[in-house]
Amino acid sequence: MAMTNEIQLPTSSQERILQKRGYTLLNKVGEGSYSKVFQSEYKDSKGNKWRLACKIVDTRKTTKSFNTKFFPRELEIMSTLNFPYIVRIHSILQRRQVFFMFMDYAKNGDMLNFIQSNGAIKEEKAQIWFSQILNALKYLHDRGIAHRDLKCENILLTSSYNTKLADFGFARHTTNEKGVILFVMLNKSMPFDDQSLKKLYEDQIGRKWKIRAQCR
């Protein structure tokens, strides 16, 4: 039988086990190729509650390279991170081949959706957010970690509209300082047209990009 990448919803037995640990899964808020993300709640023994996100990964539905290289590296790196502008892991629970990764919940979604809904970001706000992103990257690079998938979709916005860098599926112990996030923030568009790979390469080498007039 061919393997399907479809991640099933948590079973009732899995949810009961999570609830015994204080975790309750709420509504689904997103999904990727190999995961689903749920809004969740954690309640400790004293009755204190926290709103979290839960990323569910069923390794029976993924590829060999994901299971042996990318996913273990993501778990190892994220478990070591503790910085205000980076999504922090609360706990990782495993039920056989299914992993439940509880982490910071970003109420206001990702930066790309924010830009698409609200337009280009004003320079004053862009300065604040980009400073937060750079601080997060410095924290990573000081520890020899490269994110390797920097894009607006992977920058989340908290309830107080601060940024949190997320999605460490391609992260590894190295360095890489390239990215175009600031351009997208200020212009609501990508700096290069990727419909033609040849033209994309030529424009990148020639640094042929245009910034909207208000930013000049």
Image: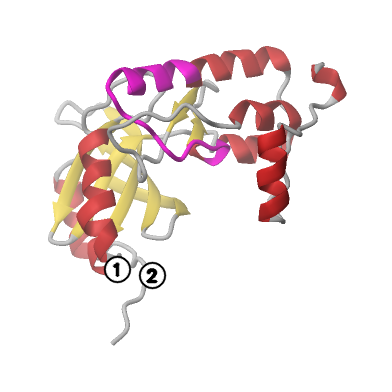
Q: Say which quarter of the image contains residue 66.
A: bottom left
Q: Which mark is residue 6?
A: 2
N-terminal-most mark, 2 or 1: 2
Mark 1: which amino acid? Lys
Q: CA distance from mark 2 to mark 1?
A: 7 Å
Q: Residues within 10 Å of mark 2 (few under 14, many from 20)?
A: some
Please state which of residues 51 and 97 is positioned toward the viewer in this rendering.
97
Q: Is residue 52 magenta?
A: no
Which residue is tagged 1? 61
Q: Residue furthest right?
A: 213
Task: Count every numbered label the image shows and give the total.
Answer: 2
The quadrant of the picture occupied by the C terminus is: top right
SS at mark 1?
A: helix
Q: Is residue 141 magenta?
A: yes
Up-down relation of residue 106 to residue 136 (above or below): below
Q: Say which quarter of the image contains residue 165.
A: top left
155 displayed left or right of 55: right
- Across and down, in percent, residue 136 comes to 41, 20
